[in-house]
Image: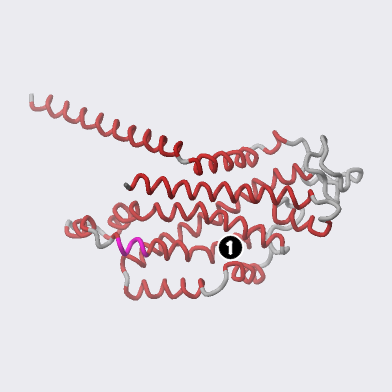
């Protein structure tokens, strides 16, 4: 009899937990739909992702194919965005550049996110000399403009995609470290953390299972906006000629290629610029929507 009762209790407990998880997912989905900024941002970035993943579906031209008979053509039914000074179809180059720019933006955000979050957890939780050392490095990095440091690093190790990513990885983690550290210093004094220490939980378990879930949301919101910063920095360095190198299609490089003939062929810089602005706008809306969503759930 006792075995049957315990089995029934376990089954009811599991069903209750599953229903609670389903309700949380449904409530989250409803909140997402209510956030116009988040929905619009997801739609914009969703379209960008489709273009990035399946570029050959939307254009029949090779982005690097040179056509001597189609030099500097204005937008038309054959070449929707016109052609450049080498006769390459600009629509295909902008579409194929979407994949690279999104990859650079997300990659340049993800590594600093992981590094900065880890160092911020350690710095905020342990304090003392460890905290002082990490924060002094952060202060040194923050005393220089972001782009200046990136340009200096790329100038030292050479131009290219790898150099571009390494430069942003080395510079961008500081913001996450400072943000997470400030959150950890508040959470670590909470009653449930003190209770975990009294129960003898290891520092690793406290950091990863108790503190991290409570401080990660602010870093995730910042990460959405940070992707915009990384994409703009990548485009800026490519515009200066020290980022992505020709003939690889990249929005900043495409804008730079058309800057010398804006009065005669405005489309060369206009369309890649529009795509860059739209992607930045989309990620910014996602960041704002996530912030509103977290505030709503926190009430």
Residue sitting nearer the eye, 296 or 248: 296
Image-quadrant location for residue 195: bottom left
Q: Write the residue at 36% across / 36% down.
A: 27
Query: Which residue is nearer to you in this view: 75 or 194?
Result: 75
Residue 130, image quadrant: bottom left
On the rendered structure, is 295 left or right of 58?
left
Q: Is residue 40 left or right of residue 131?
A: right
The residue that disc 1 covers is 166
Q: Nearer the viewer, residue 129 or 149?
A: 149
SS assignment at label 1: helix
Name above or below for residue 7 compared with residue 244. Answer: above
Q: Residue at x 37, y 33 (%)?
A: 26
Q: For residue 185: magenta?
A: yes
Q: Is residue 289 above or below residue 131?
A: above
Q: Which residues are magenta?
A: 182-186
Whether the magenta-drawn stretch holds residue 287 is answered as no
Residue 185, compared with residue 49, is above or below; it is: below
Residue drawn where x is 33% and y is 54% of the image: 208
In percent of width and height, residue 216 lies at 39, 53
Name the colour scheme: secondary structure
Q: In the rendering, at what x and y percent does residue 148 appear? A: 61, 71
Q: Residue 58: horizontal and vertical position, in percent?
A: 71, 35
Q: Position of residue 213 (x, y in %)?
A: 34, 51
Instruction: Locate residue 68 relative to residue 251 in the image: left or right.
Output: right
Left or right: 179 in relation to 141: left
From what the image shows, is residue 169 above or below residue 25? below
Looking at the picture, tell me which residue is in the foreground, 219 or 30: 30
């Amino acid at each position: 009899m006792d075995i049957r009762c315990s089995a029934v209790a376990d089954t009811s407990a599991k069903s209750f937990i599953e229903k609670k998880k389903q309700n949380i997912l449904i409530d989250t989905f409803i909140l997402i739909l209510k956030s116009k900024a988040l929905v619009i941002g997801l739609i914009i970035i969703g379209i960008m992702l489709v273009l990035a993943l399946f570029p050959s579906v939307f254009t029949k031209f090779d982005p690097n194919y040179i056509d001597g008979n189609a030099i500097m053509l204005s937008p038309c039914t054959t070449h929707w965005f016109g052609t450049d000074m080498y006769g390459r179809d600009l629509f295909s180059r902008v579409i194929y550049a979407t994949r690279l720019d999104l990859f650079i933006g997300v990659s340049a955000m993800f590594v600093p996110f992981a590094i900065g979050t880890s160092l911020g957890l350690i710095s905020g939780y342990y304090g003392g000399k460890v905290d002082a050392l990490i924060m002094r490095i952060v202060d040194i990095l923050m005393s220089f403009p972001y782009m200046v440091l990136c340009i200096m690093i790329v100038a030292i190790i050479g131009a290219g995609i790898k150099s571009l990513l390494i430069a942003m990885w080395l510079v961008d983690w500081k913001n996450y470290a400072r943000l997470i550290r400030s959150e950890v210093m508040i959470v670590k004094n909470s009653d449930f953390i003190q209770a975990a220490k009294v129960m003898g939980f290891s520092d690793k378990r406290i950091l990863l299972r108790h503190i991290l879930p409570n401080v990660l949301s602010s870093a995730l919101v910042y990460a959405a906006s940070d992707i915009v910063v990384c994409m703009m920095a990548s485009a800026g360095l490519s515009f200066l000629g020290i980022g992505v190198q020709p003939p690889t299609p990249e929005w900043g490089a495409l804008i730079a290629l058309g800057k010398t003939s804006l009065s005669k062929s405005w489309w060369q810089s206009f369309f890649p610029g529009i795509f860059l602005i739209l992607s930045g706008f989309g990620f910014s809306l996602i960041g704002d929507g996530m912030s509103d969503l977290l505030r709503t759930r926190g009430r």
